[in-house]
Image (cartoon, helix red, strand yellow):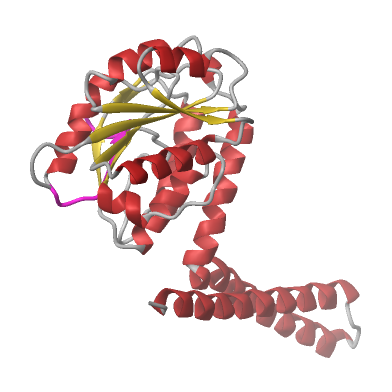
Amino acid sequence: MTGKPFVVACIPAFNEEANIAKVVLTVERFVDRVLVCNDGSTDMTGIIAEALGAEVIRHETNLGYGAALQSLFEEARKRGVDVAVTLDADGQHDPSEIPKLLKRLSLGDVDIVIGSRFLEGGGSEVPEGRKAGIKVLSGLVSNGEVRVTDAQSGFRAYNKHALETLKLSELGMGLSTEILVKAGNHGLKIAEVPICVSYDEDSAKQTPVLQGSSVLLSTLKYLSINRPLLFFGLPGLMATVASMALWGLTLYAYSETHVVSLNMVVATLGATFIGLILLTTSVILWVIVSVVREKP
């Protein structure tokens, strides 16, 4: 990257009239342009953002966080921006930390920088239950290519290569996970910097259980696609081993009593069937995914 990069802020917003003014006015001090996706808000969110100088993309109905971010990324690509910084419209993220993300990205050795609440030097008021859930999700998406401590952070910076490479589909909060999984698939490099987040439970648009379930299901979906041998093969192998043990017990019991236990037979057949299905599924998906990835 030569010269001063052209940086835009990408802010998904849904019914944030109470916060959007402060966010836009503060963010514009650190970037060249502010883009707001008014995701079907029924309040004054879009009008306020536009009046304060932000460029507003409008969704007629509420499509979700992922859909809003996809629209923002598409607009950023059209403009040929060098860096896109994403942050929430509810005021939880501190815009004065944007330079921290940009500085790390400017080193040129990574494509995405994530603001982490859980690195030393960072901080968050996230409730312990939610914090534990985020750490579980971070562990699920971390592998040899991607290592993160805060998989659900919406405070990120993307370079042009990342924006042009990532082709996204999730409409909801699962987009954060999709980005990490696909970044790993495409060899994009990721780094984290510590940030502080002011957490307000009232700002959540979904209940923690509903939001967490949605994100977990999205994460499991992408893990099943990207690691089929582990996701399906390991449980299949365990079920197969269990079925072999059950067959042994069933035959031993029959040899001793000459009586067939219907419950034992059903359990044995069930374990055998599940094991074979999972093992077959893992191999088929692994072959399909391998063929797709090898296509030019």
User: Foreground: 28 or 124?
Assistant: 28
Q: Is residue 77 visible?
A: yes
Is 163 part of what is drawn in magenta? no
Residue 196 in which image quadrant: top left
Left or right of residue 218, residue 19 in this image: left
Q: Count the numbered circles shown.
A: 0
Quarter of the picture holding the C terminus: bottom left
Is 114 left or right of 272, judged from the image as shown?
A: left
Q: Does the stretch in magenta take in 113?
A: yes
Residue 96 location in percent, x, y? 23, 20
Residue shown at 43% from the left, 22% from the top: 89
User: Residue 39, percent across and down?
Assistant: 55, 29
Q: Which residues are magenta?
A: 108-120
Q: Is residue 121 visible?
A: no
**Rendering coords of residue 256 (x, y %):** 83, 87
Q: Main secondary structure of the magenta part?
A: loop
From this viewpoint, which residue is outermost toward the left?
3
Above or below for 122 versus 107:
above
Q: Going 37% across and 13% down the picture, which residue do you hit?
A: 52
Give the residue drawn at x 27%, y 20%: 28
Question: Can you give x and y, in whole percent of width and height, for residue 266 in the image?
Answer: 84, 74
For residue 161, above or below residue 273: above
Quarter-of-image position of residue 275: bottom right
Decide which of 65, 10 is in the foreground and name it.
10
- The quadrant in which residue 258 appears is bottom right
In front of the other: 63 or 137: 63
The correct choice, above or below, for 234 with respect to 280 in the image is above
